Amino acid sequence: MIGIVAAAVASLLLLWLYSALRGGLAAAVRDANAPYGRFALAVRNAVSGLSEALGDSIVIRQRIQQLEAENETLRASLLRHEQTVRENDELRMALGLMAEHPGAICAEVVSRGDSGGWWREVRLDKGAASGIRANAPVVAADGLVGRVVRVTDDTADVLLLSDANSKVACVVEDEGPGARGIVVGGGIQHAQAELELLHVVEPMSLAYLDKEAEIRPGSRVVTSGLGGVYPAGIPVGEVRSTSPDSTRLYQRALVAPCVDFASLRRVFVLGRRAPAAGDAGGRR
């Protein structure tokens, strides 16, 4: 009997000891695995956050691309609108010019310059077959451009006011009888003969002004009508400054042209008028 009781007690003791050891071992294993579990959780959260971030980044990138495309479309539309406004303004001015000079021939600029330089001449798409003749005045909507120097059946070359060979009898508006003179093109300052793009266009000058005349900066310079080539009253430029010339007998004014020669597209060739009685000095 005692042996049976002892065996039962020993069995219970072994069961208790096994249960205690298993619980302690499981706890130890859990505690040992806890850092790895936290690491796995952190990795899983990081991967999930990265995935969401990548998804958001793709959406944002797509939205940016969409906005950039819309911006380019709006810019192109704005440029077209501005171009239309400019063309409408040019056409309105051209209609006014045509009304002022009946018989003027509208022509397009097809090329600029020659071996002599960008700022000297332009070539038009019309010539003798359209009624254009040599020495005919050429104007744009803003003012005087120059005069025709060579003509073929279908083209005409125009000497620009900016060329040093260009001379036009002019008058400064509202400045009295002493404000008459000759506008001379400044030509080109050749920095390097082989690099035309580096050439600097000199300002035009209004020479032979009466030294006592009070010429104010900002005054408008127009053709005087003397010489028989250019009709009177065509805008030429604006006075920027004045100074005595080298002889000290006259004064000279620097003149900014009314016309932007670099952007010429459409011009009007006027019919040459006969010299009026009292015109002096020959053609200028």
Image: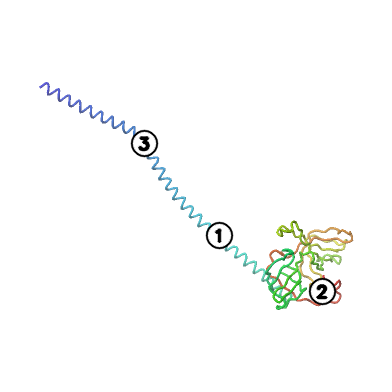
Task: Tell me where residue 112 appears, x and y as whole percent.
Answer: 70, 66
Image position, residue 131 (x, y; %): 72, 78
Describe the element under mark 1 as helix, strand or loop.
Answer: helix
**Residue occupying image coordinates x 12% and y 22%:** 3
Task: Determine crowd level at label 2: few under 14, some 14-19, many 20+ residues with C-alpha closer than 10 A.
Answer: many
Q: Which residue is mark 3?
A: 36
Q: Amino acid at mark 3?
A: Tyr
The circle on residue 72 is 1
On the image, the x and y values in percent for residue 69 come to 52, 59
User: Which part of the image, by quadrant, shows the N terminus?
Assistant: top left
In the rendered image, the vertical position of residue 73 relative to residue 11, given as above or below: below
Residue under numbered circle 2: 228
- Towards the viewer: 225 or 263: 263
Q: CA distance from mark 2 to mark 3?
A: 103 Å
* Residue 144 visible to an observer of this rendering: no
Counting residues from the N terminus, which is met first, the one under dot 1 or under dot 3?
A: 3
Query: In this rendering, would 200 be left or right of 51?
Result: right
Q: Residues within 10 Å of mark 1 (few under 14, many from 20)?
A: few
Amino acid type, mark 1: Glu
- Asked whether, in this view, residue 253 is left or right of residue 104, the answer is right
User: Does residue 131 show up?
Assistant: yes
